[in-house]
Amino acid sequence: MENHKTAPSLYELQLWMKWIVTDPRGVRDALTDPFPSDRPYLERYTSPDKNALDWVADDRSLDASNRLEIYAEAYFTRLLDSMKSDFPITFRVLGEVSFQKLISDYLKKHPSKTTNIGEIGKNLPNFISNYDDLKEAPFLAPLAEMEWFMIESFYAQNTRFLNPSILSSLSDEDLAAAEFKLAPFLYLVESEWSLDQFSKWRNESLKIDERYFEPLTEKKGYLICRENGQVMVEELSAPGFFILYKLKSGENLISTLEHAQNIFFDFDIGSKIMTWFHEWVRRGIIYDVAVKSEKVNL
């Protein structure tokens, strides 16, 4: 067995300090069980071989573990503040104590494994949907998912704007068979919750209305997209949502419109479609169009 009195190298000390300060269980639990045998992300909880605790100095007021707790608490506080920033509505709904417990439990199951602090909350919506403490609040998982999509939309790649004259220059045959490219900052979400109302609660001057914690009588389609540096959440008409969803999946226009007309036969899509398209092009939602020409062998 290795002699723990042998001083660690600088690299070994750095590895051990990274583990003990960032272990989601906290310093004391990590020191008690440095080599756990059965849990998700096992490698994230396992101590490096070289134990460096003996080389953390005590002082008159604090022993080594208490001194390490200060650093660990600062690390957790940084993650907690980041999650508050990324999920401000979820934080407002839960309050300080419940949100902190949620994030503490979340990090134990999904510890940070990246240098990009912005990626830490990626699994939070799914975690909430299976979190026993919030089983009585089924709206919270869709709310957190909406907030995550808003983050993704905000940081998504910029795209060019399509020249509207390109649409008018296409023949009816080309337009019908065209495949439209939708912006990467666009998210389409179908939900039984009032996501557009939820999104307004990012404004802290607006009071949270608990009436919206009840599900809608039927699902609605929502558009989440970035516009002029701001991410918007808006309700779409059912045909408009369907058409955008099909176009985003790569279906060509004529097939999309045929499907839409068969489903929404009581809705006059023909009178709306050009208005919708011009708006989607103007806002950068549709940013490119590809016309596939058939090859003819002579």
Image (cartoon, rainbow, N blue to C red):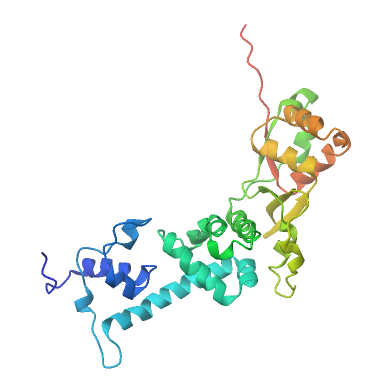
Q: Is residue 157 left or right of residue 207?
A: left
Task: Find the residue positioned furthest to the bottom.
Answer: 60
Residue at horizontal 26 percent and vertical 93 percent from the top: 60
Q: Quadrant of residue 40?
A: bottom left
Which of 225/195 is in front? 195
Residue 190 position, x and y percent, is 69, 47
- Vertical placement of residue 153 versus 257, above or below: below
Say which residue appears at 62% left-offset and 68% top-offset.
Answer: 88
Total number of numbered discs in the rendering: 0
Q: Picture coordinates of residue 39 (x, y %)?
A: 36, 57
Compared to residue 156, the image places residue 256 above or below, namely: above
The one nearer the camera, 220 or 186, is: 220
Above or below, 229 against 96 in this view is above
Q: Residue at x 68, y 42 (%)?
A: 287
Residue at image location 43% in from the left, 60% down from the top = 109
- Any part of residue 129 in sight: yes
Residue 162, image quadrant = top right
